[in-house]
Image: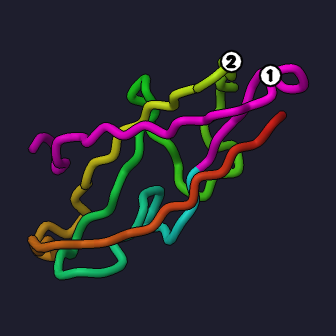
Amino acid sequence: KKNGTSSPRAFDIKLEGCDTSTKQNVTAAFSGTADGDNLALMGGTAAGASIAIEDSNGGRIMLNNAEGISQEIPLQAGITSLHFSAYLEAGFEPEAIKTGDFTSVATFALNYP
């Protein structure tokens, strides 16, 4: 742990079969139940933290932001892999932190500009 965060957990979203003849770029956004700019913990026994999501450059992705990932992502012929990471971030009240299991849900959306 560093600065009230867990170690990041990498994950990829793969885009397959995109027609690059009409659009060559996409933008992306995450939405869900928010806790500040992060994803809220929705179930389980853990408390006092939220889930932060970062892009492949370590830039924080603001949840429920229509801008989403501000730079356009170039589409590749075949498969385009989008790289992200997520980690737990402690809230402002350390006494509210409670260890345990948790669940949460985020929606991922693509936009063809």
User: Is tag 1's residue or tag 2's residue first in the polypeptide sequence?
Assistant: 1
Residue drawn 66% across and 18% down? 76
The part of the chain drawn in magenta is 1-29
Disc assigned to residue 20: 1
Are the residues flagged by discs 1 and 2 in contact, CB closer than 8 Å?
Answer: yes
Quarter occupied by the C terminus: top right
Horizontal and vertical percent position of residue 95: 10, 74
Q: Is residue 18 above or below residue 97?
A: above
For this rendering, which residue is in front, 3 or 54?
54
Decide whether residue 28 is among the magenta residues. yes
- Side of 37 relative to 109 (left or right): left
Give whichever of 89, 75 is nearer the camera. Answer: 75
| Rendered view: 55 above or below 89 | above
Picture quarter containing residue 12?
A: top left
Q: Is residue 85 magenta?
A: no
Q: Is residue 112 above or below residue 106?
A: above
User: Circle 2 is placed at which residue position?
Assistant: 77
Q: Quadrant of the N terminus?
A: top left
Judged from the image, the secondary structure of the residue bearing numbered disc 2 is: loop
Residue drawn at 60 percent across, 58 percent down: 64
Question: Which quarter of the picture shows residue 91?
Answer: bottom left
102 sits to left or right of 28: left
Label 2 crowd (10 A; few <14 / some 14-19 / many >=20)? some
Say which of 61 and 23 sits in front: 23
